[in-house]
Image (cartoon, rainbow, N blue to C red):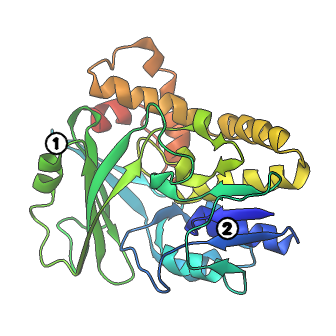
Amino acid sequence: MLHIAGLGVSGSYLLRRLSDAGIEAVGYDPKKPGFYVPCGYAVNINRLRDFTGKVGLEADSYLEAKADSVTFASDSGLNIRLPSVGFSTIDKNRLEADMLLGLEFERKPSAIPSKKKDILIDATGVSRYYLGPASGDILMRTREYLTDTAPQDGFYFRYFPSGRGYYWEFPLKEGYHIGAGGDSIEIVSGSLKDVRNPRRLMSRNIRLAPLFNYAHKGNVIGVGESIGTVSPITGEGIIPSMESAEILFNCISRYDDIEDLKEKYVSEIKNRFRRYEKLSKLLNNARAGNLKKLENLSAISSAKEDFENFGIQLKILKVLKQIAFT
């Protein structure tokens, strides 16, 4: 029996995939029905179609706004406009609700399974509620708003100096999602000083460290943000989390023995998200003022891959140094 704790995007997707395949699974999530998290929820709509198609849904029905281009800026005044190759905002809350339609789940936390053959999937995101803390974890604090207007026009990122965080503005179907995240609450607050009359406000943590060496504990296996499937340089985690759930689904389908399952799953996760390890080192080097290290050169192709997976065509290979870590 599989127990999925947490029904965000990775947990909801995994529960749907398992149920559709006839594999016995039950979901748990204590959030109340209709619980709404205000966020921009940016994805590459082209990649989202691949996953929603596997669960019988149409990605474009969740589309909020689609970018023609994305502006990247730095505090030094440098602006670069990059072409979009699918970069969009979506209604993730409705997508999650639709993936759960007709499925068995309970509005409460999961208990630890008592049977040895039972497996608990920790899809609790940043809390890692069942897996517990992990060495080397990096969390970025954010402050986020829903507004009617925005200081900039269109999709916009501004990176803080030395890899200390970033500010963003994403158009929605109605209004904008504006937010900032970083190491310092002072720099985050200062970057949001021009936001006017927000309709909603929230604050949360985002995991920026890949925790693939801490992806399981006993009969608990993590998926999505609980194991760090969030880009260290863009904060994008929706598609990577669905991708990790697809990898886990395929491993569950192939391996009956839990030890084999854990070994193969971690191996495939590390292989698929190898770029996150490089980008995490790049981020740490930027924060420490060590951008001249030779190992950073190997991260350039990983950065290019990461941006393009996000739906942004990275034509200028120096953009990471010129903008993100100035």
Where is the C terminus found, in terms of image quarters? top left
* Mark 1: secondary structure: loop
Q: Nearer the viewer, residue 312 or 161?
A: 161
Q: Where's residue 222, x and y in %?
A: 62, 49
* Mark 2: secondary structure: helix
Counting the numbered discs, the total is: 2
Mark 2 or 1, which is nearer the eye? 2
Instruction: Inspect this view and state whether residue 236 appears.
Output: no
Q: To which residue does mark 2 refer?
A: 13
Instruction: Inspect this view and state whether residue 23 appears.
Output: yes
Q: Earlier in the sequence, mark 2 or mark 1?
A: 2
Q: Where's residue 320, x and y in %?
A: 37, 34
Q: Is residue 258 above or below residue 96?
A: above
Badge 1 local density, few (<14 within 10 Å), some, or many (20+)?
few
Q: Where's residue 156, x and y in %?
A: 30, 58
Q: Nearer the viewer, residue 318 or 180?
A: 180
Relative placement, left or right, of 74 versus 106 is left
Q: Nearer the viewer, residue 140 or 50?
A: 140
Residue type at numbered disc 1: Asp
Q: Could you tell me which residue is drawn at 56 percent across and 40 percent down? A: 305
Badge 2 local density, few (<14 within 10 Å), some, or many (20+)?
many
Q: Nearer the viewer, residue 119 or 141?
A: 119
Q: To which residue does mark 1 refer?
A: 75
Q: Is residue 297 above or below residue 300?
A: above
Q: Where's residue 241, x and y in %?
A: 59, 55
Relative placement, left or right, of 3 versus 92 is right
Relative placement, left or right, of 222 versus 134 is right
Which image quadrant is residue 291 in?
top left
Residue type at numbered disc 2: Tyr
Q: Could you tell me which residue is drawn at 29 percent across and 74 percent down? A: 176
